[in-house]
Amino acid sequence: MKLYSTNNKSKTVNLSSAVLQSLPEDNGLYMPLEISPLPSSFFQKLPSLSFQEISYLVAKQLMGDSIPNHTLKSIIDDAINFKAPLITVDENIHILELFHGPTLAFKDFGARFMSRLMNFFLEKSGKKVTVLVATSGDTGGAVASGFFNQDNIDVVILYPKGKVSTLQEKQLTTWGHNIKALEIDGNFDDCQQIVKSAFLDPELNNSINLSSANSINIARLIPQSFYYFEGYKQLSHSQKNINFCIPSGNFGNLTAGLLAKNLGLPINQLIAATNINDVVPKYLKTGEFNPIEAHHTLSNAMDIGRPSNFNRIMDFYGSTWNKVKKDIKGYSYNDQVTINTIVEGNSKLGYVFDPHTAIGYTAAKEYNTQFKEENTIVLSTAHPIKFKNEIQKYIDFSIPYPTTIQYTLDKQSDKKQLSNNYNDFKNYLLSK
Ligand SMILES: *Cc1c(COP(=O)(O)O)cnc(C)c1O
């Protein structure tokens, strides 16, 4: 597999460099040079394939001979070891539950796959890396869990003070060993900016081998394309067009949908659902992309005003607005609508949405009032129990935490507080 930078198509690297380096030096994003569609024989046998078999074939198609077949197979069997069931909740609306991994959010897919792939490439080269991850909540927990005890990788997590839930904070701060948590006095965009500055700082990069586990790393996106095929498979008896609706923040998940589409999955529409941080729905409406300061909302994992995968979406479409808006529809909702959907989902559908999935469902519903004869699969990005405190205010929601989560909640936190000043962070890293 060869990859280019969105800022320079002529210079390519192999998968191992893209995964270990994360960001190209020219500050672009790595994109696959070639994506060839899966053959029709794959789609014929799709209904009878297991999720792991699908994942292997999709990965193989993208990654080619970047890693040996048996290694790829064992990475997938180890990383993708939980289910992604499709639940029909409403006429023509189906929820693809991506939250059955260890941290109860879809980010387990990306983190578990990436850690194992990175570990394979590091072992081969005899190197060590420090992975930096900026998180608005769920990424850090999934990365900490996915990377815990990987000998060749230190993980440094930056999260915004006061903007993650109690459980999320526990999932970031209770690991120890190779996992360090930094509480930054700022918002998520500050955390992301610090990480970006670190990658562009030659002095720092001379002394530490840095990498990233944010969705800017292509290794996060590859496994996220697998479950589009898995969701599609579970509806393959239906004759109707199939759409995917994606609650979005940094737009990694939606970009993975574009990977799946380019791999030949017949996705009719992608529907981007955001909270009031609506720069992409606005772009789809007006053709203008204006990043904003992130606003804090109930769906905090989507509180992003400068979505880092936007340039990948542009790259897929040669920055042609007319093409983008044909394939991707955008909707955004505020917290009040989110709450109304959680309440109605519970009373009318008997299904409890977490705030992110609630936004996805609302968008699917709005889209479907116009396109009644289509099926829409909403990616459910988090288990509602992760937002128990928030949800409990509005509905009677009293299921207990799973035992693994209770165990995390009972553990002691260990975090370091830092300002949102890049130099403080740099000094911290250099003094380690
Ligand atoms: C990260 C996250 C999102 C947003 O995903 P992107 O790939 O950043 O668009 C949505 N919901 C939840 C629960 C998340 O953790």
Image: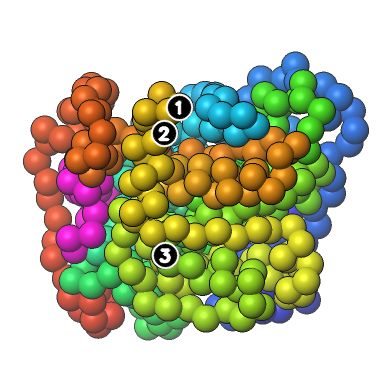
> Which region shows up in magenta?
161-181
Q: Which residue is drawn at the image coordinates 63% and 25% (left, top)?
A: 51
Q: Say whether disc 3 or disc 1 marks the residue closer to the N-terminus.
A: 3
Q: Nearer the viewer, mark 3 or mark 1?
A: 1
Q: Nearer the viewer, mark 2 or mark 3?
A: 2
Instruction: Judge left or right: residue 296 versus residue 41.
Output: left
Pick the residue in front: 45 or 92. 92
Q: Which residue is mark 3?
A: 276
Q: Which residue is mark 2?
A: 345
Callout 2, which amino acid? Gly
The reply to whether discs 3 and 1 touch (Cβ–Cβ < 8 Å) is no
Q: CA distance from mark 1 to mark 2?
A: 5 Å
Could you say which quadrant of the image residue 227 lies in?
Answer: top right
What is the crowding at mark 3: few (fewer than 14 residues within 10 Å), some, or many (at least 20)? Answer: many
The kind of secondary structure element at disc 1 is: helix
Callout 3, which amino acid? Ile
Q: Which residue is drawn at the image coordinates 39% and 59% (left, top)?
A: 334
The reply to whether discs 2 and 3 touch (Cβ–Cβ < 8 Å) is no
> Is 352 above or below relative to 136?
above
Q: Which residue is mark 1?
A: 349
